[in-house]
Image: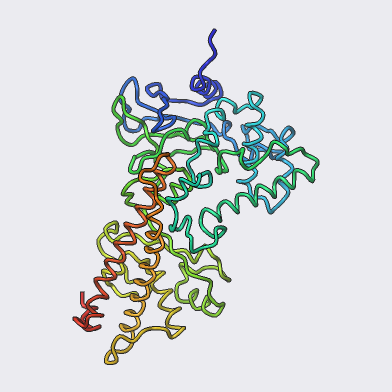
Amino acid sequence: MEPLSKVDELTQWFGENGGHLNEAIEMFHSCVYGYHYVAKSRPIDPKETVGRCPFSLTLSHLNVISAPPAGILNCSLESVCSKLLDNPKINRGTIAILFLAEQRLRGRDSFWFPYIQLLPTEVDMTTPLWFKDEELVYLKGTNLLSNNTPPEKTSVGQQEGLYREQWELGISELKDAGVSTDNLTCENTKSSFPVLYPVLDIFNHRLGTKVGWQFHKGDFNLCLEERVEQGMQVFNNYSPKGNEDLLMGFGFCIPDNPYDQVAVRLGEIQPEMHRKLRDDIPDHWRSETWEPKESVFYLRAASQYTPGYSNMYGVPKLSCLRGIPPELAKSLYLIILDRNKLAALSEEVAGEKKNWVGIIDALLHQMEYTLMGINQWNGELPDFPSTAGAKAALIYRTGQVKILEEVISELKKFMDPLRAGVVSIEDSFME
């Protein structure tokens, strides 16, 4: 008897352990899509279940606790990762990653071997943490790899640093417990997800696909909400995400992604100013002290915005501010006003409108500076991206530039007539 293929072995293991796949679908592999499912024998109708993964097949830190939930395979006695549970500094996601690496090293002795052997190897990973220099070059100047920011403070650097810090903390804990960790390195692991649902995570993501996720006592049912024709790929939808999230989390990007955005960050401010922001913008600034994650705001191109725009927090209802989150505009208003650095464009008109002109001018300068920081590296880009990672990075880069150019264009439409003296400040607010 010939040995089963990896796909057949996974399908058999999945079915024998309570998993279910719609009989009309079949797994295929290609260089473009990797492993994926296709409606092979007939169309798939709306409301049909395409797959069900029982909670008992999931892989997570729950497998190494002494009394896991009902049905979860208890590996607490055999796994060294159980020794990490009592350390509050090691998060559950890190334990899941270490457990996955441990199970990979067990080979066919692992219960999850048929699933693990289909996971991408290091050379197949397309997230920036695994990029080579010829792929990283496409990220130069962007939020993910800004050359004006120390490497450890870029998005890639921060994620890599946090990942490595947690990993090394876990390894140190295992060494202290007398466990050999020679084969456990952070280059051996594959995934950063705290809970893995085998087989159902093979369905590729496509923006706009209508699916239903149904959970019952941990069991996961994936249902379609629209028809898939025979011969077409069956997709999942992991919810609307910008390309930065998709690239960092999944290793791909979507051209002209309508949910794409550009992250901008405010530098740390004094405690007094932070309290002022909390008082005036409590829905955004919630922490008692400065939290870096609260200093991040997301720009979107005006063309991607729904009709209308907000005047929350007293932000003027101007078309040039549609791509600017009102929380960011108001925060800048309060910070700059406090520092008394608003430029007076007219001595005749004072007060609120002049202040907002100063804010818009400051936003324009910052956006132009950010765009310049990306474009200054264009001369170093190869003529054509040669790998999947490079292609995804170029899509991300192109999207960032497009959003910044659209935001800048809107801000310039407001500021240029004022600078030229063609309109007054009062008239510029009459849209």
Looking at the picture, tell me which residue is in the foreground, 394 or 47: 394
Residue 104 location in percent, x, y? 62, 31
Colour scheme used in the picture? rainbow
Judged from this view, the residue extending furthest toward the top is: 1
Image quadrant holding the N terminus, namely: top right
Measuring from the top left, give residue 345's x and y in whole percent.
30, 85
In the rendered image, residue 430, in percent from the top left (x then y), is placed at 21, 78
Q: In the figure, 76 relative to 249: above or below?
A: above
Left or right for 134, reference 72: left
Residue at 38%, 52% (x, y): give it.
397
Residue sitting at 55 percent across and 66 percent down?
291
- Location of residue 98 in the rendering, given as x and y in whole percent from the top left corner: 65, 40
Asked which quadrant contains residue 328, the reply is bottom left
Which residue occupies 53% across, 47% down? 129
Q: Which of 111 and 356 lies nearest the eye of the viewer?
A: 356
Q: Is residue 209 left or right of residue 179?
A: left
User: In this orientation, which residue lies closer to the viewer: 387 or 325?
Assistant: 387
Where residue 27 sits, quadrant-wise, is: top left
Residue 141 drawn above or below residue 99: below
Judge from the rendering whether residue 63 lies leftward or rightward of residue 326; answer left or right: right
**Figure quadrant of the C terminus:** bottom left
